[in-house]
Amino acid sequence: MAIGSVSGQGRQLRFALSAFSRQAAFRYHASFFYRWRYAGSAPERLLIAPIDLRTADPTTALDIYAGRFYFSGEGVDAEGSSVFDVDPPSESWARELHGFGWLRHLRATDTAISRSNARSLVEEWIAQSNRGDPIAWETGVTARRVISWLAQAPLILEGCDLTFYRRFMRSLTRQARYLRRTAHDGPQGLPRLRVMVALTSAGLSMSEQNRFLKQVAKWLDQELVRQILPDGGHVSRNPTAVLDLLLDLLPLRQAFAARGAETSRILLSAIDRMMPMLRYFRQGDGSFARFNGTGETPADQLATVLAYDDVRGAPLTAAPHSGYQRIEAGTTILIADAGRPPPTDFSTEAHAGCLSFEMSSGRQRLIINCGVPFDSTGPLHRLARTTAAHSTVSLNDTSQCRFLTRSWIGDWLGEAVISGPTRVKSERRFEGGTTILDMGHNGYVSRYAIVHERRLALSDAGDRLDGADVFLSPSGNPVSRSGKDAFAIRFHLHPNVRATRDGSSVLLELPDGEIWEFVTDSPEVELEESILMSNTRGNRATTQIVVHGRAQRSPGVGWQIQRTAVGGRRRAVSAPRQRETPA
């Protein structure tokens, strides 16, 4: 794809060369001709089985027993044959199958039939594991399988014969050796960190692995230092990544204690820093704000992890390393994205939503971003990553960031962010009973020579949000006429919000009857269609408020969202004054 700047081209080239070298090393070590080196003697026994904190559904076990496997929104009926012989409907479905996380549902039933079924399915996988299925041997998938087999060992091994036990241990050892060899060659980010968790779990669980455990525990510490930011966020800037990691790291901490081994201070510190971030990203209804790849929040898993939070303190107000700001006033919560895109290697799921915000009143969502869909590779997923899918400003129907898409490089290496905001301003202050956020980014400077600045001011009572979006040249002067200065300020509404025009304003009615009113000093306000994408429940149609204009004619646009009286006469809401452009 075309890159609009030399720096963007250089970033793309560096990313491509780095990823190419890792891919080449990984494919060599994962090849059929090399895989024989992972064979050999296996440990005699398992000493412990780490716990699995992910919640289980016994009804899912009935589907599995009947040969019906539902993953990633798609189902397959094995119809009496091995599920590992069927053609997978999608790559995400195949990853779920070969990851074996679904074994926990069989364990939840605690019956002899489920144990026998689990053992049979594991045995089927071991029998066909030499086929070299590329998805089954992806490092992230293999790591998830090792973690699942170790956690569900009581289910798999109870009542088994010695022959199966030895075959199981040989396969588990082979996979651990494969991960050890390819640990630093696979994808960056969560998959690599999960590999280190799997290796450390294997070192703790299997007998006579002291030397192996010492090495992989060191690798885990190094990756935690690299990926967990000082404020507890993940380097990918995805709020859900924090929850996913804690679901793996908390059992690992307990496994160290069960073996009587010393837990590293790095692991303990990472967990302690990540715990408050779970509360930081929660909106009033308890779910995470939708930023940088976050979709529906698994409420059951979140509740399970929060039960391990010994501090239970109030959430932070700012996460400067993760690049987020949070204001909680009265019953209103506002969370804003005030950070740069993550490093290229960690950005394959990142979104172009700088300066976007989400807002809730009580337990009701009001302003949202569009989230992420089921399909993680299709056009709707690409749409979800664009600036227009976020409650912020887009210029000329383009995004702040450029993604590595629509090319063989993007298909092979992942759709990483290769250019975007390099400078993001974020200042917070309290003034006259109002918390004010002054933010700005330069994501459009290379293409349109326009800097976007946004001010958000939430009253101490949480009943009024004053906002202003300003467009300046890089020097701070008014934008010159170029014909490429059309802007759209978007406010995506939750599907439960009913929006109606009322003269020059827009009334926003929440399910409990609470009413908010949107007003602006711009005459070009429209109600347009939008969508709330979900990776678990399916997509829902909704509405967005869009303020159109041109930066040269309207260098500053003021707007206000104010809660009006419920069940009585509405208070008058005056239109905000138009922001003046600095001289």
Image: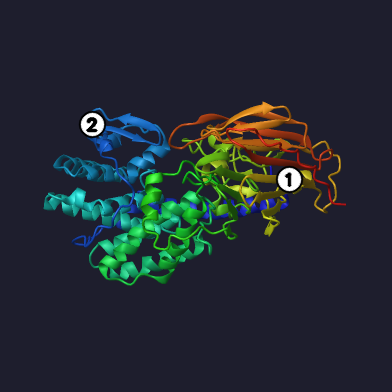
Residue 535 in view (yes/no): yes
Going by the image, does 554 lie left or right of 270?
A: right
Along the viewing direction, whichever of 558 and 255 lies nearer the viewer: 558
Q: Residue at x 24, y 34 (%)?
A: 62
Q: Which mark is residue 66?
A: 2
User: Secondary structure under badge 2?
Assistant: loop
Question: Where residue 205 sits: x, y (%)?
Answer: 26, 61
Q: Is residue 413 left or right of residue 422?
A: left
Measured Cα–Cα span from mark 1 to mark 2: 57 Å
Circle 1 SS class: strand
Q: Residue at x 17, y 54 (%)?
A: 166
Circle 2: residue type:
Ala
Q: Nearer the viewer, residue 565 or 151?
A: 565
Pick whichever of labels 1 and 2 is earlier in the sequence: 2
* Quarter where residue 480 is shown: top right
Residue 468 bears which disc, if any? 1
Instruction: Name the amino acid, label 1.
Output: Ala
> How packed is label 1: few (under 14 Cα within 10 Å), some, or many (20 or more)?
many
Which residue sits at x=33%, y=30%? 76
User: Which x, y percent locates residue 508?
Assistant: 61, 33
**Nearest to the observer: residue 36 or residue 5:** 5
Observer able to see residue 401 = no
Where is 113 relative to 456, above or below?
above
Task: Give the quarter of the figure containing the N terminus.
Answer: top right
* Residue 582 left/right relative to 1: right
- State yes or no: discs 1 and 2 in contact (Cβ < 8 Å): no
